[in-house]
Image (cartoon, rainbow, N blue to C red):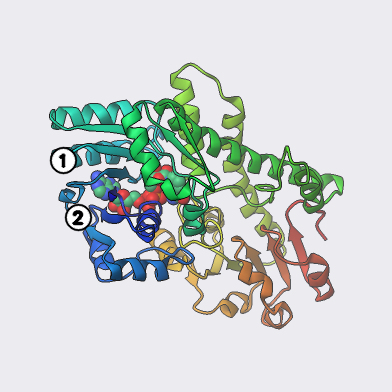
């Protein structure tokens, strides 16, 4: 099939690479000229595990192309919308300008029957609006708009593309359903493809993300309880997670959720509910609690060095989670920003996200070229991102570079007992500090 993808970011690019790998002919369209130029020259513009190799293969075969021109949608069987829906700067609702602009721009180029499939996370009713815009711009176009919510996880985008838990399709026309069935033909055997109404599909995405955010917030509150009561959140989460009704995912206590989806989607969901006159207290509590948590985490790091004047703080991790270079709403960036307000001296390291962090934190902190630099003369090291690689560090050697052996491990990556034998004051989430 011929597929056009509008928006070549963390969703559009891995999806383009995935569909091209399945031998579809894919053209990725983006208005960002620099991005498209880089992709056309063979440079992958974002980090995703395993993507670079596949990218090289499909580009070489000619199955994946890039353009800034909406002519790319010509003759497409499916046009996938994967543009951003960030929080509106004023209202904090999903900012729909990119979706609507894309709909307007693609409309004149539609030819033959086309399914417009929305993968961006959008408020309920957006499908109706997109349909209206395209019809106004091109009254003769033969098309249907479906909702095709995306559930991939950054860091695992390629894995998740090929192994989705489910594919949800929101379509109100049989003709469109048939096209989407063809698009996902190779998934039929292994994945449930759930056909629902367009509005239901749009809601599934927000309902899922809000639920996962609540689950994280729940385990974080439970961690606070453990710290006071003497229980250990790791053990508690394990005991909970063995219950199949609960499941063991999203039970890692930490500094609070972040990233480009959960914060904006929980807020958008709460505001959308307000519009419909529905009170969503659980989501509202989660949003407020998660926000406050980042500040508490910054205070926690300061607390462990409160006896030191102008402490030197080393930070491990800038990305919002492991496996990505994305720092959007990263807890690490928010915690660092809160510490900067108190005048902290910070040196940070990340395996992938340093360049993106520099765009946000500018020269307010030092960026370590080598991980060891974070430990140089540090009074405390704070672990803010759960990169698996941190677990393999030779802490004994690194500790010898520190001025004071203190660690605040907000991802519970390290073995506290071992660190204490090395003379560390070690503070982790959800267990008693010593
Ligand atoms: N990032 C994730 O993990 C994830 C997961 C599931 C769903 N989503 C949703 O998918 C959507 C895209 O997210 P993302 O993280 O890929 O965003 P992104 O910011 O990484 O990429 C969006 C791209 O769209 C381009 N764009 C914006 N307006 C355009 C237009 N009119 N025409 C052409 N290109 C345009 C931008 O230049 C950018 O390259 C959002 O709605 C998001 O909520 C994201």
- Up the image or down, 199 lies above or below 325; here it is above
Residue at position x 61%, y 67% in the image? 310
Specify the quadrant of the image occupied by residue 35.
Answer: bottom left
Q: Which residue is mark 1?
A: 111
User: In this orientation, does residue 174 appear?
Assistant: yes
Q: Is residue 280 above or below residue 225?
A: above
**In the image, which disc is placed on residue 404?**
none
- Mark on residue 68? 2
Q: Residue at x 42, y 46 (%)?
A: 185
Q: Secondary structure at mark 2?
A: loop
Q: Position of residue 399 (x, y in %)?
A: 71, 78
Where is residue 272 shown, x and y percent of the image? Answer: 45, 26
Q: Residues within 10 Å of mark 2 (few under 14, many from 20)?
A: some
Task: Tell me where residue 332 sits by quadrant.
Answer: bottom right
Please state if 419 lies on the left or on the right of 108 as rendered: right
Is ligand 1 less than 8 Å from the beta carbon at label 2?
yes
């Amino acid at each position: 099939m011929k597929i056009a993808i509008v928006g070549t970011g963390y969703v559009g690019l891995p999806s383009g690479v995935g569909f091209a790998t399945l031998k579809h002919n894919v053209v990725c369209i983006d208005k960002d000229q620099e991005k498209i130029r880089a992709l056309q020259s063979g440079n992958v513009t974002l980090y995703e595990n395993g993507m670079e190799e596949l990218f090289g293969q499909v580009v070489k075969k000619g199955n994946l192309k890039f353009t800034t021109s909406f002519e790319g949608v010509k003759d497409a069987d499916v046009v996938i919308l994967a543009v951003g829906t960030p929080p509106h700067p004023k209202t904090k609702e999903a900012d729909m300008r990119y979706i609507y602009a894309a709909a307007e721009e693609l409309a004149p180029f539609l030819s033959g029957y086309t399914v417009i499939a929305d993968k961006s996370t959008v408020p309920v009713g957006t499908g109706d609006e997109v349909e209206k815009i395209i019809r106004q711009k091109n009254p003769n176009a033969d098309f249907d708009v479906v909702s095709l919510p995306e559930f991939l996880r950054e860091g695992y985008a390629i894995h998740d593309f090929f192994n989705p838990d489910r594919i949800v399709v929101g379509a109100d026309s049989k003709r469109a359903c048939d096209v989407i069935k063809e698009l996902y033909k190779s998934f039929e055997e292994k994945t449930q493809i759930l056909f629902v109404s367009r509005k239901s599909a749009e809601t599934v995405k927000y309902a899922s993300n809000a639920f996962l955010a609540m689950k994280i917030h729940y385990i974080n509150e439970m961690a606070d309880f453990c710290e006071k009561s003497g229980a250990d959140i790791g053990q508690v989460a394990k005991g909970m997670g063995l219950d199949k009704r609960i499941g063991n995912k999203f039970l890692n206590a930490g500094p609070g959720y972040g990233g480009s989806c959960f914060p904006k989607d929980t807020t958008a969901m709460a505001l959308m509910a307000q519009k419909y006159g529905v009170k969503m207290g659980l989501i509202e509590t989660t949003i407020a609690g998660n926000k406050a948590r980042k500040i508490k985490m910054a205070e926690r790091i300061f607390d462990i060095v409160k006896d030191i004047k102008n402490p030197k703080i080393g930070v491990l991790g800038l990305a919002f989670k492991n496996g990505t270079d994305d720092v959007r709403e990263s807890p690490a960036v928010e915690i660092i920003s809160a510490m900067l307000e108190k005048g902290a001296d910070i040196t940070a390291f990340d395996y992938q996200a340093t360049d993106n962090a520099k765009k946000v934190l500018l020269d307010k902190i030092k960026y370590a070229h080598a991980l060891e630099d974070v430990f140089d003369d540090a009074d405390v090291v704070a672990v803010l991102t759960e990169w698996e690689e941190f677990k393999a560090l030779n802490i004994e050697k690194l500790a010898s570079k520190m001025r004071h052996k203190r660690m605040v491990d907000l991802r519970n990556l390290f073995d506290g007992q071992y660190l204490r034998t090395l003379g560390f004051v070690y503070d982790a989430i959800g267990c008693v500090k010593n």
